[in-house]
Image (tube, rainbow, N blue to C red):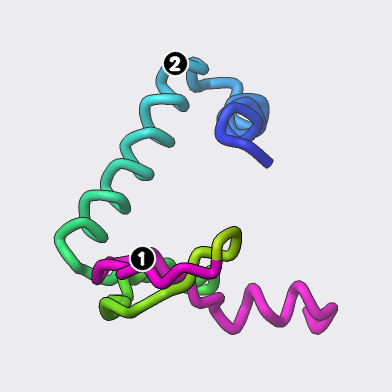
Amino acid sequence: MIRSELIQKIADENPHLYQRDVERIVNTIFDEITAAMARGDRVELRGFGAFSVKKRDARTGRNPRTGESVDVEEKHVPFFKTGKLLRDRLNGKS
């Protein structure tokens, strides 16, 4: 599912809301999650999962095409851990 499909589904299930308002709500939620992660905060949505940021240390990598060694800088990457409810539903335990 992509963002526009999510917006359309929420708008269809809530006919009292205008689609532009649903779009603003969805965008605000994603913007707030992104901003929190940019600050290094953890975002937990109970029953769904938790978004966090993990630090990857600098390392020496290898260019797969040439075999040459390259320095890879330290970086921060997003990480998502599923919640128990989501895992259970995916495995047919609900």
Q: Which mark is residue 16?
A: none
Residue 73 magenta-highlighted:
yes
The foreground one among 16 and 76 is 76
Element at label 1: strand
Question: Residue reaching furthest left?
Answer: 39
Q: CA distance from mark 2 to mark 1?
A: 31 Å
Q: Quadrant of residue 14?
A: top right
Q: Which amino acid type is shown beneath numbered disc 2?
A: Arg
The foreground one among 94 and 66 is 66
Q: Which amino acid type is shown beneath numbered disc 1?
A: Val
Does residue 6 sit above or below 48 in this rendering? above
Left or right of residue 91, residue 65 in this image: left
Q: Closer to us: mark 2 or mark 1?
A: 1
Element at label 2: helix
At which x and y percent is residue 75? 27, 67
The foreground one among 55 and 36 is 55
Residue ID at (35%, 44%): 29
> Is residue 43 visible from the viewing direction of this image?
no
Does residue 5 sit above or below 50 in this rendering? above
Residue 35 magenta-highlighted:
no
Q: Quadrant of residue 26?
A: top left
> Is residue 40 visible from the viewing direction of this image?
yes
Left or right of residue 10, residue 42 in this image: left
At which x and y percent is residue 3? 56, 34
Residue position for label 2? 20
Left or right of residue 21, residue 65 in this image: right
> In the image, which residues are magenta?
67-94
Residue ID at (49%, 21%): 17
Would you call the spot at circle 2 few (<14 residues within 10 Å), some (14-19), or many (20 or more)? few
At which x and y percent is residue 55? 28, 76
Residue position for label 1? 77
